[in-house]
């Protein structure tokens, strides 16, 4: 368990470093700012939560104040996630109005929680931060503890329900990958809402001396774990799907780049002046694959246009690869042709992909 807690801290601060780097590059993106608020709340609240759970003072603050900071930062993070969905679903002006409206429940909740923490007697503050469910104590102390934890879980309930509504709303007009991710996320949120409702009910019922049945709390945990997992998967899904598609495109361009090498080599030897980059770099960078791919396709097409008058003089019954070689030999021998350029390796369909397929067929035949 201790290992998992340490891992959580490492992940939280690593994620914060990443989003701060991204925010520095795109400071005007409201969705990225919202995600930064989420991750910052999670990361900043982590050490305070560890101290509160252990009943330790941290930075001169007693355990219950640490518990207040940890839950407040968690709620601020949930507010950031609400804003992410709002700015994704609405235009900027409408999203800003909604974000201001959503700020009111957060301020009220944190203010009431602060009052509750200040009202807890000194002799209960450590125990309230560590094992609040087992407290006896006086009526005022127990009421303040109940209010604190009920509000802490209650705002999460409100936040998850609000995010569910906005996720469903945004999913209607989103592109397929994002829509699938939002539907997965909303399914996870639909599980988190009843789980948090049970936790709030448990906080209130204990104050009146009627704790909820253990099976109901176990059910909440069973809702909580898959709910969190589905939310994480839903957030990651569009990014992972996009990266998967980008990787497939990168691999396709890399394969095509190498398959076109025989054709490009022959044409480049005859028309080196057509090269789009006169001094090619020897380094083959991962990010430069697309640029090299398109450059090679264009240079192959330019070369075929240049050599096509010589190919037009070759026998039409020969394969195009042999006609191309013959035309190149004729030009290399210094012959002059008066033929007009003709179309070579004509694709069957429109689009660059169909064009590249024809060039690849010719390149394979030239091997």
Image (cartoon, rainbow, N blue to C red):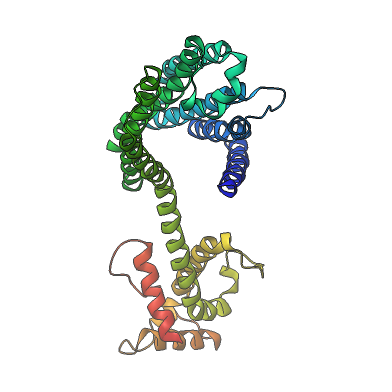
Q: Is residue 117 above or below residue 4?
A: above
Question: In this image, 50 relative to 131: left or right?
Answer: right
Q: Is residue 332 above or below residue 171?
A: below
Residue situated in front as seen by the camera: 180 or 69 = 69
Q: Residue at x 63, y 32 (%)?
A: 51
Question: Which quadrant of the figure has residue 25?
Answer: top right
Q: Return the residue found at the far right.
A: 60
Q: Residue at x 49, y 9 (%)?
A: 140
Q: Residue at x 59, y 20 (%)?
A: 125
Question: In this image, 321 relative to 276: left or right?
Answer: left
Q: Position of residue 195 (x, y in %)?
A: 35, 33
Residue situated in front as seen by the camera: 82 or 76 = 76
Q: Residue at x 41, y 76 (%)?
A: 360
Q: Is residue 335 above or below residue 171?
A: below
Question: Which quadrant of the figure has residue 181?
Answer: top left
Q: Position of residue 215 (x, y in %)?
A: 31, 38
Residue situated in front as seen by the camera: 68 or 307 = 68
Q: Position of residue 311 (x, y in %)?
A: 41, 82
- Res. 340 visible in picture: no
- Res. 98 visible in picture: yes
How many numbered circles does the render carry? 0
């Amino acid at each position: 368990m201790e290992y998992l807690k340490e891992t959580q801290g490492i992940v939280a601060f690593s994620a914060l470093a990443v989003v701060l780097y991204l925010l520095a590059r795109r400071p005007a993106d409201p969705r990225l700012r919202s995600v930064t608020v989420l991750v910052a709340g999670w990361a900043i609240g982590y050490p305070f939560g560890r101290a509160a759970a252990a009943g330790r003072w941290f930075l001169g603050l007693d355990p219950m104040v640490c518990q207040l900071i940890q839950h407040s930062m968690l709620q601020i993070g949930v507010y950031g996630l609400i804003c992410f969905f709002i700015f994704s679903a609405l235009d900027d002006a409408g999203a800003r109005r909604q974000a201001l409206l959503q700020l009111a429940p957060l301020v009220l909740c944190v203010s009431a929680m602060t009052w509750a923490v200040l009202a807890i007697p000194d002799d209960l503050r450590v125990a309230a931060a560590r094992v609040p469910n087992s407290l006896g104590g006086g009526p005022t102390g127990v009421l303040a503890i109940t209010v604190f934890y009920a509000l802490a879980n209650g705002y999460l309930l409100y936040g998850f329900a609000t995010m569910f509504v906005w996720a469903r709303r945004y999913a209607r007009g989103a592109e397929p990958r994002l829509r699938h991710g939002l539907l997965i996320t909303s399914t996870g949120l639909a599980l988190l809402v009843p789980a948090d409702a049970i936790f709030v009910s448990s906080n209130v019922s204990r104050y009146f001396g009627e704790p909820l049945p253990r099976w109901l709390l176990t059910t909440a945990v069973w809702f909580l774990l898959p709910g969190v997992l589905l939310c994480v998967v839903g957030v990651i899904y569009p990014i992972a799907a996009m990266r998967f598609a980008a990787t497939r495109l990168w691999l396709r361009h890399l394969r095509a780049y190498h398959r076109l090498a025989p054709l490009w080599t022959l044409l480049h030897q005859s028309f080196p002046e057509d090269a789009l980059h006169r001094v090619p770099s020897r380094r083959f960078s991962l990010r430069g694959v697309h640029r090299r791919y398109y450059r090679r396709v264009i240079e192959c097409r330019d070369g075929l246009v240049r050599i096509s008058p010589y190919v037009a003089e070759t026998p039409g019954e020969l394969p195009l690869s042999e006609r191309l070689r013959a035309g190149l030999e004729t030009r290399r021998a210094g012959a002059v042709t008066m033929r007009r350029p003709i179309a070579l390796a004509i694709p069957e369909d429109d689009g660059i992909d169909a064009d590249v397929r024809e060039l690849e067929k010719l390149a394979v035949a030239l091997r």
